[in-house]
Amino acid sequence: MILVILSSFVIAFAAPRLVRMTGDKSGYILALLPAAHFIYLLTYAGEVSGGTAVAQQIDWVPYLAISFSFWGDGLSLSFGLLISGIGALVIIYAGAYMKGERYLPRMYLYLFLFMGSMQGIVFADNIVTLFIFWELTSITSYLIIGYDHKDESARSAALQALLVTGGGGLALMAGLILLGAAAESYELSEIIQRGDLIREHPYYLAIVVLVLLGCFTKSAQFPFHFWLPNAMAAPTPASAYLHSSTMVKAGLYLMARLSPALGETLIWQYALVGAGAATMLVAGYLALQQSTLKPLLAYTTVSALGIITFCIGMGTPAAMKAAMVFLFVHALYKAALFMVAGGIDHEAGEKDTERLGGLAKAMPVTAGAAILAGLSMAGIPPLLGFMGKELIYEAAIHGTLAVSMAWVAVLVAANAVNTYAALAVVYKPFWGARVQSPKTPHDGPGGLWLGPLILGIFALIFGLAPQLLGQSLADPAATAMLGRPVEAAWYLWHGFNLALLLSAVTLAFGAALYLFRKPLRRAGAILQPAAAAGPEAGFNAALSAMLATARFQTRILQNGYLRLYLMVVFVFILAFPGRELLTKGAMAWPTTVLWPQIYEFALALLIVVSTIVVITAQSRLAAVAALGALGYSVAVIFVLFGAPDLAMTQFIIETLLVIILLLVLHHLPKFRDYSGPVARGRDIVISVLSGVFMTMLVIAALEEQGHDPVSHYYSGNAVVEAHGRNVVNVILVDFRALDTLGEITVLAIAALGAVSLLKLQTSEGDAP
Amino acid sequence: VNSLIVQAWSMLLKPLMLVFSIFLLVRGHHEPGGGFVGGMVAAAAFTLSALAYNVASAKQTLHVSPVSLAALGLIVAASSGFVAVLTGEAYMTGVWATVWLPLVGEVDLGSVLLFDVGIYLVVAGITLMIVFALMESQEEYGN
């Protein structure tokens, strides 16, 4: 499993080069990696469906109980197979769909990074490791949605997705830490066995709220659903992968994973069932209002996520089974239909279903793939989708504490919208009257239809032989979600029962929705103002309020006047450490005074004189020269008092500083007095007080004999532990090397910023 | 500036300063010196040649852009810490080995020297980034 994750990251960075080497065939070649992952993970299937979990571990920060530990049980393996299997098909598809695009190599980089992160989430055992991969998927998703970086709307959609899922991520982090504290373990494999301990812990409520915030934002549950349709700004291959079948399922994965630890309480059930139902209804309404391919599919994705959340919330063995099967159903048909939608757009040049029709003759293979996926989406036997729907109904009919028969109506409505969407996305473009499209339609290259066709065939095979999926993956996964074994026979046909009746009602209802879609859309438009004032408007208002606050406080705190910054720093030093020095009686007078040498007097005099020259100079050049003299004098002090390193550095810095100051002279405004007599008086008081304070502080520090200075440790151990006699350097590069690394990083960033500002200024004349 | 005297001196001084900067870098572990001051001296060498001729020629003698220099330095410094990870120690622990080098004899070589090389490159890189950018705007201003 570590191998799967690592190889994705390695290939990610090699991908751009590979694309350049292999050209048009790059999709097929790169797809070999996820295909290999798929086969590799399949080899674990036998072991895992037997009930054993596979574990691998690398210690990372052992004293914080953080380790790179991974394990795979039925649940992880199900997700892992979806991620690698659909991943392989999407990579092939991307190669065909984005052929010749300039930034295709970059897209592959993002997709593989995402793939590795996603595998990391589902196989992580340690929750800190899980969280890191969780955040990585948010970041890669940001890059992917903003792929078309010159498009303003793509950028803002990317930012919105990042802020919503990232904000949820913060809540999740807090939730996971509390969970770790409550369970007294950071390993998922242990946490899920301590459900009773966690449920009775005082943190329980906080854990549920925080973890669910993370899951709901990631899996686009109401009221956080709005980022997902906007994320359709991403290129279609990425939408098919991230925003239909994988990333948005990360939230579902975590809810399913933590079910044994957090579930089986009313709070958990009501939260999940409530959010799932609300999501289904809102997404159903929004889907009805849509006629464009990708947004329509996006809203049905939101609705499907709601259905799965609902099932996980019910928490019965039947519901867990239904959730897992529907997860497969949805991943298979949704990825396929996104790829079909991209194929239609690519070959016919039209995205609006109302302006498409009769494409089946011109695009027979694509139509074949679409019909398989569409039948599964609509839930018609013998496709897997039929079984998924039946299982959901059966689970809901038997219900739980939180779910009564009334909820079944919501499920029927949500599934009817799916049927409607299947008709709108598959039937409308491919059959019926031929509608003229901007391009002459024909089947695209193999890469465009191979993926959807394979996924459609899988939906058919799993429908005909449900035990294939059921016994090897769905049962072990449901076992993991329940924390106890489930056993059930798997068959497509459940006989004539209430669930079948509901299924028939769903189909009729869905067909009616499709037939009357136009009047319904007009009627639904009445709700438009309410929808416009929804959560997205709230998000936008919060965002602009935050930006306004940032601008306000920047104007006050970052006003750009160096003299004000310095004043703030000095006043605060005087107000706090200065007061401490006065009140704590730490003031001291040197007990032993060595009479200074004559050259020390001379040096002090030089410093004082050059300071006076600096502040009274009438030209800037004179001030700069005097400043240089001041710096050199200070460097000489370092030489005299045994700090040659410091002196050397000071000399070279002073030299470069004078050169730089001379270079920027012409950038500066006219040299004159900017402050009036009052400001001057104030500045004199502050600077004199600061000088006095520093002097007193140094004297007090010298007189302080309470502690053994830390320098003794450094000088005592420099040669022994760090093989160096120059203590200063040993501290910099060995004892405190991590600090130094941080400092040089900050230096490099600051320099980049400074240079960018300079370049911006010099090219301002010809900037737009 | 374009003075023949400065140009002649810079021809002489620049290689000396570069050698001196490396000397400072290498001796830093035992005697005063180190990556920081070494990097500054190296930057000063190229600043001198930029002052004597112009920025374009100084950039040319540098061969790589100052930004890449700084980036390389960060990579070197950050990755030097992994030497210890490979031997099972915590990140950034100093790892030392005594190596026999031709002409020099036995030398104590450590991963921290690599870290110091990183600092050297970063400091030289960012100083030159800023100095070159300023001098370029100065040259434009002069024209």
Image (cartoon, coloured by chain):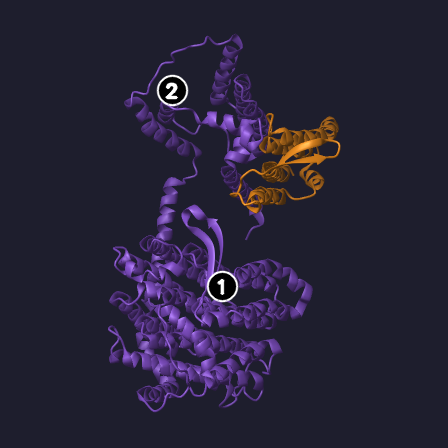
Chain colours: A purple, B orange
Kind of residue indicated by mark 2:
Gln
Residue A448 vs A225, above or below: the answer is: below
Mark 2 element type: loop
Kind of residue indicated by mark 1:
Gln
Tags 2 and 1 on a common chain:
yes
How far from the left and from the top, in percent, is residue A507? 37, 87
Q: Could you tell me if residue B18 is visible in this image?
A: yes
- Give the letter of the chain under mark 1: A
- Give the letter of the chain under mark 2: A
The residue singled out by tag 2 in the image is A705
Q: Could you tell me if residue A413 is visible in this image?
A: no
Image check: B47 left or right of A393? right
Please tell me how crowded label 1 is: few (under 14), some (14-19), or many (20+) other residues with Cα within 10 Å: many
Residue A503 sits in which quadrant?
A: bottom left
Q: Which mark is residue A119?
A: 1
How far from the left and from the top, in percent, is residue A404? 24, 78
